[in-house]
Image (cartoon, helix red, strand yellow):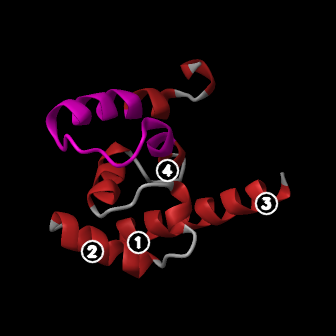
Amino acid sequence: MLACFGLKTVRFLKAAKHSEQSVNPLKMMTNVEKMRIARAHSIGPTVVEWLEQAGYEMLEDFASETPENISFRVEIATGRARNQNAMTAYKNLIELAKSSQLQDRSN
């Protein structure tokens, strides 16, 4: 099954397995949701972890968000300061979430 996802997914799953063992025992995101979120350009395992710490649970959570609001929530939850690369990644994530919603509605 992993062969169809590619190298980014394999790296992500390894990081997710490690983070489940060492970070927060009360995980809110499933591994499937983490993989869906990580499909957005510039979003990797570390950013997914920050998003989880900020209280996000599903890809659909981002469809009605703004990059500024996501950045603010991540900054509050993790202490990570805002930067332009993160804002670009959040824009990509929002677009992925919106396109996912459109696909779900058309099916």
> Which residue is more in the foreground, 40 or 22?
22
Residue 1, compared with residue 51, is above or below; it is above
The answer to whether residue 59 is seen in the rendering is yes
For marks 2 and 3, give the one nearer the viewer: 3
Q: CA distance from mark 3 to mark 1?
A: 27 Å
Q: Amino acid at mark 2?
A: Arg
Residue 85, magenta (yes or no): no
The answer to whether marks 1 and 2 mark residues whose Cβ atoms lie closer than 8 Å is: yes
Q: Please, what secondary structure does the residue beneath circle 1 have?
A: helix
Q: Which residue is mark 3?
A: 105
Q: Main secondary structure of the magenta part?
A: helix
- Secondary element at tag 4: helix
Q: Nearer the viewer, mark 3 or mark 4?
A: 3
- Image quadrant assignment for residue 98: bottom right
Q: Name the residue: 39% across, 60% down.
A: 56
**Badge 2 element:** loop
Q: Earlier in the sequence, mark 4 or mark 1?
A: 4
Q: Measuring from the top left, give residue 101's x and y in whole percent.
A: 69, 61
Instruction: Measure the C-alpha gap from mark 3 to mark 4.
Output: 19 Å
Left or right: residue 99 versus residue 34 is right
Q: Which residue is mark 2?
A: 82
**Which of pointers 2 and 4 lies earlier in the amino acid sequence?**
4
Give the amino acid type for the residue marked by disc 3 in the picture.
Arg
Helix, strand or loop under label 3: helix
Region in magenta = 12-35
List the residue tagged with mark 4: 37
